[in-house]
Amino acid sequence: MSLQTRDTLHEGLAMRGGSPRVLLTGALLLLAVLAPYALYPVFLMKVLCFALFACAFNLLIGFAGLLSFGHAAFFGGAAYVAAHVVKEWGWAPEAGLLAATAAAGAMGLVFGLLAIRRQGIYFAMITLALSQMIFFLALQLPFTHGEDGIQAVPRGHLFGLFDLSQPLTMYYTVLAIFLGGFALIWRAVHSPFGQVLKAIRENEPRAVSLGYRTERYKLLAFVLSASLAGLAGGTKALVFQLASLTDVTWQMSGEVVLMTLLGGMGTLLGPVVGAALVVTLESYLASTSLPVPVVIGAIFVVCVLLFRRGIVGELLHRLPGTGRPRADRPRTGS
Amino acid sequence: MKRYAVTAAIAACLLAQAHSEPAHAQGAAYSDGKIKIGILTDLSGQLSDSTGQGSIAAAQMAVEDFGGAVNGTPIELIFADHQNKADIGASTARRWYDVDQVDAIIDVPNSAVALAVQQITKEANRVAIFSSPASSDLTGKACTPNGLHWTYDTYALAHVTAEAVVASGLSSWYFLTSDYAFGHALERDTGAVVESQKGKVLGSVRVPANNADFSSFLLQAQASPAKVVALATAGADTQNAIKQAAEFGLGQSGKNIVALLLAISEVHALGLQATQDIMLTTPFYWDMDDGTRAFSKRFFEKRKAMPTFYQAGVYGAVSHYLKAIKAAGTDAASDVMKTMKATPVNDFMTKNGSVREDGRVLRDMHLFQVKTPAESKAPWDYYKLVRSVPADRAFRPLSESDCPLVKKM
């Protein structure tokens, strides 16, 4: 099966064919615009932040085949940067988000330079080790206020015009940020750059033999993924007006893997669905007596045993017309 | 037939109107016809044993004891698990205030979550009563007109423990400190009191957070000539340190272990063999007097465990809040806060407690020592009282406060 045909399968529900694709994209957009009138906006904003985070992670694992186990460092680290520059230095929210994205990108560059020299489990372990360093920095550095976190971050006015303390204004800002990030990922995946990434995922020695300098492609993918994860983290800091240790712990790195796998690795919409599912469970199970981690763990086990392609991956697989057997899920880190 | 139905409907509407009007006239304006209290707690993490379901049970007892209604307005209790994540805690608190019309949030173990809830409560202008978090910042630089810090705080733990232990003749100290803000604050405050009481801090060692192996740290403590080894740690770290200290025989080598934050559920889990002779500060122990015993017996029947001081604090906080909205005749936050601050706190664990303008609740604190297995006569018979410290000496005086509400005065 050629790479080209696999792509069309990968692209997610909204991306197939002519008018149905346009219709579906439109319907989803309309849903996103109307959602805050039906559901609680803060909850939706949280879903969008985690969806962008999972999409950024998916860019790396789903399209370049690199399993990073340290993405919490970018997400949480950027949240601290955004919270600090907005609260202590009085920067505008858009400047705070840019600073967060840039900081995460810089971290991604350092992590990437070290980690992409190794493959598979070693790659994952290096990213984990580096992100644990960021965790301990976040625990110790005075500006993060240790386990209390940075609290009471002002949301401010976007471009000096839009009052972000209004829930709906904040929601549409977050939606715009998410759509921007998602469009960037979509563009990257469908560019020649994305094709090379997929070639590397499928067979790196072959990509090298074709004359591609795979290290550079992998590094660029890593930095892009880290920056977008940072954008998501910075946005989350503004939404919740706090940055805390939760976002830099290794459990958060695990959570984003879980979201991506549940939704469907290597599909564009999969991580969004996965993030929405996990965040919904965390929010709505909170007021029941069920232990949340156990429920999420059980769902993960069921997912791995019964539908290994994830929710969106499985849907695409079973959709009429796309029922061709797909090759197994991409190998990670090779 | 149809006409009857219409007439009945109109009559019902008029009746409802008539019913609601006197309530307004009296000024008993409880918003949306019910009083809703949210218990935001840890139901799945490491604090779930000492707070969690027990906190919810204690709150239920308080509501039942109040008769389930205030001036005829029903009280509703809801709860949620913040999973020790500040964002989940914050979004739950926001949703409760914005959508579910919750009037007060109570409990909130975990300082990061509590500080977030403190801000949100101020923005939403409701009431938050923190019975389980430790950080003294809640009534310090993060104080708000809408928050009360109910049971204890880091300042009181440090001061009461240091003062009482030094007064009992143990003057040389060595610290085992969790290497993050909570541990640093405890070590700094406790050390300062030890020195002001003419005691000596002979050394300290920083322990990484969530550590499993304390052996090298405990050996350093054992090698120091200090008489007291103070654990400025929390949760699982404290439990691991105590277990391993027992294995190394720190007690037998003449050291007195002082745990700056330890709940009775943790003593129960570790067993008296490991915890014997440890000194600890707490505002509540079930076997102090008839009042505490009566409450604890009822609690035990519900939960099959004695209440921790956190859980006892939840009962007290819910009761005081309900008393205040009854007295104020409204659940509007500013009036309720005013009433709560003006009313002395009296319940089974609090004798003439008071609420200060910065939101700090002042209560007596007690230093206990854990009994040896031979001394313990019954299940849960764990503590013996060493000394009590009165409220005015236990908590941070207003003159040292960095709460902006106080500076304005």
Image (cartoon, rainbow, N blue to C red):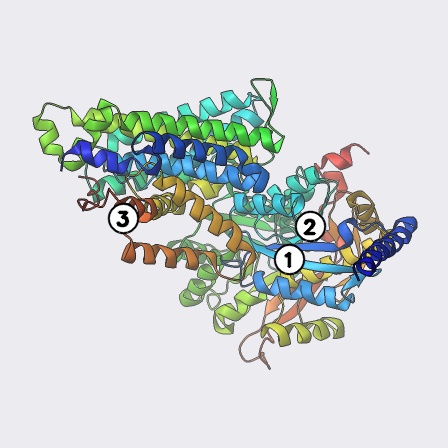
Residue contact at pointers 2 and 1, CB within 8 angstroms? yes
List the residue tagged with mark 3: A318
Taking depth in this image into account, of B297 and B240 the one nearest to the observer is B297
Where residue B215 appears, as percent x and y from the top left, is 38, 58
- Subunit bearing disc 3: A
Left or right position of B209 against B97 = left
Which kind of residue does numbered mark 3 sit on? Arg
Which kind of residue does numbered mark 2 sit on? Val
Taking depth in this image into account, of A256 and B398 the one nearest to the observer is A256
B33 versus A104 height, above or below? below
Where residue B257 appears, as percent x and y from the top left, is 53, 61
Circle 2 — which element? Answer: loop
Which kind of residue does numbered mark 1 sit on? Ile
Q: Residue at x 62, y 73 (%)?
A: B302
Circle 3 — which element? Answer: helix
Q: Classify residue B378 by image quadrant.
A: bottom right
**Disc number placed over residue B102 in the picture, else none:** 2
Q: Can you say which quadrant of the picture contains the N terminus of chain B? A: bottom right
Where residue A247 appears, as percent x and y from the top left, is 45, 41
Both marks 3 and 2 on one chain: no
Both marks 3 and 1 on one chain: no
Taking depth in this image into account, of B105 and B6 the one nearest to the observer is B6
Q: Can you say which quadrant of the picture contains the C terminus of chain B? A: top right
How packed is label 3: few (under 14 Cα within 10 Å), some, or many (20 or more)?
Answer: few
- Subunit bearing disc 1: B
Where residue A267 appears, as percent x and y from the top left, is 30, 39
Q: Does the rendering let one see residue A80? A: no
A44 versus B9 height, above or below? above
Q: Classify residue A169 by image quadrant.
A: top right
List the residue tagged with mark 1: B78
